[in-house]
Image (cartoon, rainbow, N blue to C red):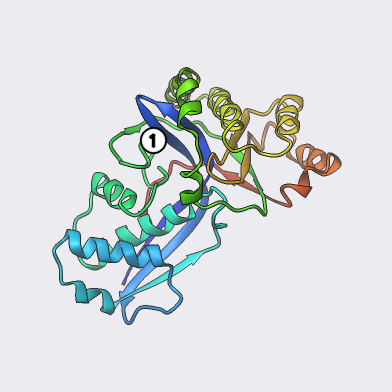
Amino acid sequence: MAQAQCPASCGEIIQGWILGSEKLVSCPVNWYSHVEITTGAPRGDERPLMRAMVNQLLAYWQLPPRLTQTIRIDCYSTIPVAKGMASSTADIAATAVATARYLEQALNINELATLCVGLEPTDSTFFRGLTLFDHQTASTQITCKGLPQLDVLLLESPLTLTTAAYHRLPRQQWLKEHAPVLESAWRKVQQACADGNAALLGEAATMSAVVSQKVLAKPEFSALLGLVERYGLYGLTVAHSGSVVGLLLDCAKHDVDGVRGQLNAQKLQAHWPKSYLLNMVAGGVEER
């Protein structure tokens, strides 16, 4: 038996045209997909991408394809699906690491990145540290040093959007036009990590969220920005290819109950009926 877990993401801290192509920096939070690999027949209700990862790994290691029929995948995850929370990335990355351990094979981070994007555009949550990642080719992997400490009030919408559907949206021209804004936001992310500056990270995230409004708009966005200003929050992050929003803050410093009260008073809960107070984490797949 082998086990691994990978965190979800509250959207992306930044996503856009950076260093010559569309890239992202995920916002990992302490909400995990747990995967267990054991000997047994495949489950009838397993998630297809997880089996696809096992089959891809067998081909990569040049192992007999028939082995897949002896590998059972059990997934324990409550991460909302198709809302921009990197649920698929958490599933397939944890599956890959657990399978490697189960079959006693080596798997480094570069191989993991390549294998994940081989299945679908992938978030950067499996890196240990906030990472600028080319989520379609894995050709760029720049991990920041350090991690600002902050909390995330994640707002969950009932709306869903698959990664594939987002990538069909006509967005490239808009992203290229706003490349200077995202390049600046990326520099702020690097500086924020180096200095442990949560406010600067929030500023970068808000810059990217504003640009994202022209591609995939979030309802009542101005009202959310008003909450950030009113309560002196660090900023907000959005799922650039999904529906969740995260308010970046410090539970010890900011009035979380007041923010929640205003979400209700301004009827914003009509758009985000569920909320979760989480911690931003470094990311990375952990064997268990």
Q: Which residue is outermost to the bottom?
A: 41
Query: Residue sitting at 36 percent across and 55 percent down?
Result: 93
Count the numbered circles shown: 1
Say which amino acid is labelled 1: Thr
Name the spot of residue 21 as percent of width and height, x first.
37, 30
Name the spot of residue 72 as percent of width and height, x first.
34, 75
Residue 122 lies, with reference to residue 227, above or below; the image says below
Query: Residue sitting at 31 percent across and 72 percent down?
Result: 1
**Seen in the image, is 7 located left or right of residue 238?**
left
Residue 43 lies, with reference to residue 82, above or below; the image says below
**Seen in the image, is 5 located left or right of residue 280?**
left
Split into 4 quadrants, where in the image is the C terminus?
A: bottom left
**Seen in the image, is 188 located left or right of residue 257?**
left
Q: Which residue is outermost to the left?
A: 62
Query: Residue sitting at 27 percent across and 78 percent down?
Result: 69
Residue labelled with disc 1: 131
